[in-house]
Amino acid sequence: MLNAAIIGLGNWGRKIVEAVNADIPLFRIGHAVVREVRDDVRAFARAHAIVPVTEFQQVLDDPSIDAVIITTPHSLHADQIVAAAAAGKHIFCEKPLALTRADAVRAVHACENAGRVLAVGHDKRCWPSMAALRFIAAGGTLGEILHVEGHTSNENSGHSADWRHNVQEAPGGGMTGAGIHMLDALIGVAGPVASVIAHFRSTRGGADPRDTVSALLDFKSGISGTLSTVRTTPFYWRAHVFGDAGSAEALGPTRLVVRMRGGGVENRDFPAIDSLRAEMTAFKQVIETGRGMIKREEMIATVHALEAIFESMDTDAKVELA
């Protein structure tokens, strides 16, 4: 059985452990690297047969550990990926892969050179609505794709760990936590971004912020796009692809609305799934078969666009991506 360690055992790390261990465990998570072994950490680890340790190097030096799952603050990702690849571990890293294109390239190349799997945690790609959206967009049913739109919001702003409100770890307000999921989704349909104009507006900072992000995107494919995110309003997800023959709109995890020229409208509803377990299943499968997960060029393209959005937010100017 695949033997893994999780690096970081905060709220999201625990959700991943629970998803892996639900029903029949997908693989074994035997170790967790934590800053300190608090009582709550010790209790959770005991319940899931996990050994908590405080040094990342302990995991890297253990030849019995095949893979690491990284759920640490964003600025740590690239260095941890490089170190894990050098130690011969496969890597699943929560989004964002990195905060700069240079770090994303460094992480990707380290895994390529070591022959190790690198996966990124964009669990929204596993939603049935999004899988169906990508399929219909790629299949030609909508004709030539002209435009994409995305909106994602949640009400997590007052319930996040303190580091998520640190501008060094999470620049760009809601873009780093929520908006990047939609950015990845749009790139998955339209390809790499060529230029962006982004606007960040905040009415309150601190641990329970009020801010919005909106962006105009031009893709290298010639497709245009818009993206917006609000991190303090009730959950909402809409990814909409427009072609010259029809459009398809993913609403939340399980609904796809297809509108065709001439007035035909079709509502497709899919059974709900556990998207975290689905992406952990995909991670296991890509290690075993070498197929699946997000293409590495898309990993880099998403971080490159994210970095450009940060720059445009700061300057309120258009940013061209080299």
Image (cartoon, rainbow, N blue to C red):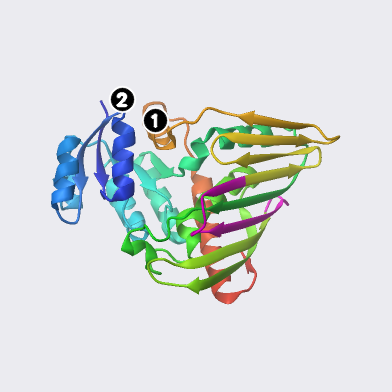
**Amino acid type, mark 2:** Asp
Which residue is pictured at 64% across the width and 29% down the height?
268
Q: Which residue extends farthest top? A: 24
Q: Earlier in the sequence, mark 1 or mark 2?
A: 2
Q: Are marks 1 and 2 in contact (CB under 8 Å)?
A: no
- Whether residue 132 can be seen here: yes
Which residue is pictured at 15% across the width and 56% down the height?
36
- Horizontal side of 14 relative to 315 (left or right) equals left
- Horizontal side of 187 relative to 248 (left or right) equals left
- Whether residue 321 can be seen here: no
Relative to 134, does residue 104 appear above or below in the rendering?
A: below
Q: Which residue is mark 1?
A: 281
How far across and down, in percent of the image, does residue 196 sit? 63, 63
Label 1 vs label 2: CA separation?
Answer: 13 Å
Query: Is residue 298 located in the magenta-colored stretch of the structure?
Result: no
**Which element is circle 1 on?**
helix
Which residue is pictured at 46% across the width and 44% down the height?
122
**Amino acid type, mark 1:** Thr
- Counting every numbered tag in the picture gives 2
- Horizontal side of 238 relative to 86 (left or right) equals right
In the picture, which quadrant includes the N terminus? top left
How far across and down, in percent of the image, does residue 162 sit? 32, 63
- Structural crowding at the residue carrying mark 2, measured as other residues with C-alpha within 10 Å and reported as few (<14), some (14–19) or many (≥20): few
In the picture, which quadrant includes the C terminus? bottom right
Which residue is pictured at 44% across the width and 55% down the height?
104
Q: Which residue extends farthest right? A: 262
| Location of residue 130 by image quarter | top right
- Chain part drawn in magenta: 220-238
Q: Nearer the viewer, residue 58 or 85?
A: 58
How far across and down, in percent of the image, does residue 241 sit? 69, 43
Res 23 label: 2
**Which element is circle 2 on?**
loop
